[in-house]
Image: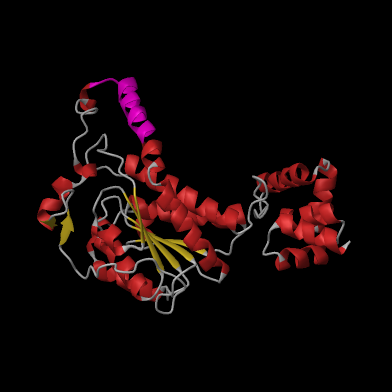
Amino acid sequence: MEDQKGSGIDSDQGNKPDQGSKSKSKSKDGKMQNTEDLLGSLTTEQQNSSSWNIDRIDTLDILKVMNAEDKKVAYSVEESLEDVARAVDRIVPRMKKGGRLLYFGAGTSGRLAILDAAECPPTFGTDPRLVQGFMAGGQDAFHIAQEDIEDRKEEGVREVQRQEITGRDTIIGLSASGQAAYIIGVLEEAGRRGALTISITCNEHSVLDQAADIPINTVVGPEILMGSTRLKAGTAQKMILNMISTAVMVKLGKVYKNLMVDLNPKNKKLIERAKRIIMLAAGVSYREAENYLERSHRSPKTAIVMIETGSDYETACKWLKEEDGFIVKAVEHGHKNN
C-alpha cells in the first residue's frame, strides 16, 4: 500500500534529510567531503588501468579495450535490479491515476532522458505529455553542449515550477556523478511538491541519491577515458531507462505477450509491423490483419479484441476501456458477454 506525502499519492522517503544547498557529500567511509575534494573521490573520475596506454595501441586494440569495459556494464546494472523494480512498482499506480513520468538530466544524461521519452509515443501510443525528458539548458543544449547550466541549482527548481509538477507525478533525475546541482534542485523541489523522486547515478554516496525517494545507483567503474561518462555510465543509464519505461508500459497494458499492441503506425514500416502484430496475436492471415487494421482505425490492440471476440469496433473499444487497456481481460469480458 502506498503512503501519503503532502498532496501526493505515495512516498517511502520518510526520514529523507533536507539537502538544502549542501556543499558536502559522503565518501565511502561515510565522512563528509568538501566539494573541492569530491572529484577525486568519484569512481568515474579515476584512471582506468585497462586503458592507460590507449593512445599508443592500434585501432583494433582500442576497440577491444572498449568492448571489454562495456561488457561489465550489464553486470553492474544487474546489481540494481531490485531498486529498478521498486521504482517501476511505485510509478505504475501513479500513472494510472493520471500522473506523468518526467526525466531530468544534464549533458549526456539529459540527452538520454529526451531520447527515451521521445520513443514512448511511437512505441506505446502514449500521449507525448505523459512521458517527457528535460535537460539543463533546454532543447538547444541537446545539440550544442551548455555544460555550465548543470551547476545552477536554481534553474532546476525553476524547471519544476514551469512544468507544474504535482504529487501525482514521478520525477527521475539522472546524473552520472550524482552531484549535478541542476538535478539536485529538480529532485528537492519535486519532493517538496509531493512527487515521487528517483535518482539514477553511477557513483556511490552522492548528494542526488540522498535527495531521492528511490536511489538507483549503478557503479560501472572508471571510464576508459577518465571522466567521460558518455561511455559506460551513459550506457548504464540508458539500460535502466529502457527497463523502467518498458516495464511500466507492460504494467499499463501497452503490451500483449511480447507485442507492442499500442504502437502508433504512422509510416510504412510501422503499418506493416502493426499487421504482423495482429497476425501473430490473433492467428489470422496477412489480408485479414490488413482488413482489421483499417476497421480498427489503425489500432492493433482494438483489432485483436475485435477478432478474438467477434465484436465491432465500438464494442471492442468499450471493453478495452473497462479493462484498463488489457487485451486478455477485454477478451475475457467479451466472451462472458457473448
Q: Residue at x 75, y 42 (%)?
A: 280
User: In the drawing, does residue 241 fall left or right of residue 308?
Assistant: left
Q: Residue at x 32, y 22 (%)?
A: 59
Q: Main secondary structure of the magenta part?
A: helix
Furthest residue toward front: 1
Question: Which residues are the magenta region?
Answer: 57-72
Q: Nearer the viewer, residue 95 or 234?
A: 95
State the image coordinates of residue 66 (x, y, percent, origin top left).
33, 30
State the image coordinates of residue 222 (x, y, percent, origin top left).
24, 38
Rendering quarter of residue 25 = bottom left
Rendering quarter of residue 198 = bottom left
State the image coordinates of residue 191 (x, y, percent, origin top left).
35, 71
Colour style of the rendered protein structure: secondary structure
Q: Is residue 4 a member of the stretch shown in magenta?
A: no
Q: Is residue 74 above or below residue 104?
A: above
Furthest residue toward bottom: 7
Q: Nearer the viewer, residue 314 or 326?
A: 326
Q: Residue at x 27, y 54 (%)?
A: 178
User: In the drawing, does residue 294 fall left or right of residue 176?
Assistant: right
State the image coordinates of residue 125 (x, y, percent, origin top left).
62, 58
User: In the drawing, does residue 333 fall left or right of residue 212?
Assistant: right
Q: Residue at x 19, y 69 (%)?
A: 21
